[in-house]
Image (cartoon, grey):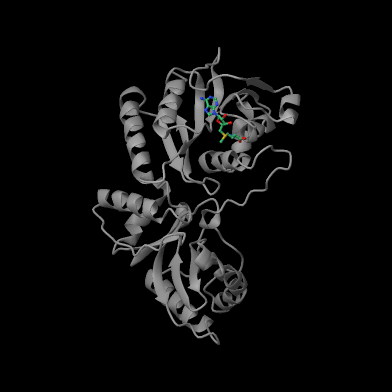
Amino acid sequence: MSALLLYCRPGFEKECLAELTEAASTKGVFGWANLETHSGFVLYETESADVVYDLVPELVFSRDAWPVFSRLHDLDPVDRLSPIIEAVKAFLAEQNYNQFGDVSCEFAEGDVYRATSKFAGKFVHPVRQALRKAHLLSKKEDSSKPALHLFFKDSSQVLIGADKPRLRTVWPMGIARLRFPSSAPSRSTLKLEEAFIYFLGNDWRQQLENCHTAVDLGASPGGWTWQLVNQKMNVYAIDNGPMDQALLDTGLVDHLLEDGFVWKPAKTVDWLVCDMVEKPLRVAKLMYEWLHQRHARYAIFNLKLPMKKRFHEWADIKEQLESQMAVQHPRAILRAKHLYHDREEITVFLDLRNQNG
Ligand SMILES: C[S@@+](CC[C@H](N)C(=O)[O-])C[C@H]1O[C@@H](n2cnc3c(N)ncnc32)[C@H](O)[C@@H]1O
């Protein structure tokens, strides 16, 4: 494989590449990319795409990725399919796979590339039929097999790649398609829902059934609190700003006009969530202290990143938390992601695993 294609939020290509480059170098792998700012993707040229692909689940700024095995240019508008089928056939023969389990036609999110979405959406049907006819694709979708990915820069150029089921993301291209609940007071409710799915998995609602109490720091108007209340949790909502009246009417919310950096609960709560707009290191330290002092068992929080050096800011914070965890909580879990619903921010999950001795 000669390259790895990564998707990211348009405008975060530099962060995506910087993080990947650093991760790759720890494996002795080097590569390069011609960055297209605001494109929404990074094409990382490397002889060791498979090695780098394995690192993707740990990356924060990449939404999804797969190794590229073929690049076709100047596709004939009259017959785009034949060269694609030939390339797929050659790859399968070389790899000793017999079939792919699925196929997708993809495009980048950047404004310049968005126009390709219509073409890609239509092209997937003929390509699926042609692959099935040539016995290169299973009759029914089979998620246990590698999936074929076609990334169209435009209708005449395509990158072709194969994923690995164990490295597949929850959402294709990392685009979390969630429905906005009409009774939620703010769109940022989707950020917390996406975070729960991403960090806990699709059965997150069942996992939260045993959690009854939560604190939301910086809660106004209540989008994050709404998610917690929807899981029937009792929530302390800490903010000087107003909370949505319908949420207060549930009787599950205690709205306290307090400073989120000072207030603490009388008893340990299950969840701590925090969306305060503050310096990211200050928020990260606060979250760590809450869990270290057993005010809460688990935390999900947002870190607002400055415009410049966004990757380095996070790398510094991560290093500080990790060195503290290595001494105090060696079994701790720290994960972070630039979620689809995040803007100039990332979302972090922290579990110090110190609640059971
Ligand atoms: C991005 S908004 C939160 C939106 C909320 N998560 C939602 O889903 O509706 C940030 C909030 O943090 C609050 N905030 C900032 N600093 C705070 C502090 N020191 N203590 C409590 N709240 C704070 C602000 O008043 C603001 O309402």
Image side of residue 303 versus residue 45, left or right: right
Relative image position of residue 280 (x, y in whole percent):
42, 34
Quarter that holds the N terminus: bottom left
Identify whether 41 is placed above or below 179: below
Residue drawn at x 44%, y 24% is 286
Comparing 193 with 132, the one in front is 193
Relative image position of residue 63 (x, y in whole percent):
47, 52
Quarter that holds the C terminus: top left
Residue drawn at x 57%, y 61% is 142
Which quadrant of the structure image shows residue 126? Answer: bottom right
Residue 80 visible to the viewer: yes
Residue drawn at x 46%, y 62% is 39
Relative image position of residue 71 (x, y in whole percent):
41, 74
The single residue placed furthest to the top in the displayed view is 266
| Total marks placed | 0
Image side of residue 126 versus residue 318, left or right: right
Comparing 188 with 88, the one in front is 188
Relative image position of residue 203 (x, y in whole percent):
60, 40
Identify whether 140 is placed above or below 169: below
Image side of residue 97 versus residue 320, left or right: right
Quarter containing ligand 1?
A: top right
The single residue placed furthest to the bottom in the displayed view is 78
The single residue placed furthest to the left in the displayed view is 28
Which quadrant of the structure image shows residue 70? Answer: bottom left
Residue 201 visible to the viewer: no
Image side of residue 118 versus residue 310, left or right: right
Identify whether 71 is placed above or below 184: below
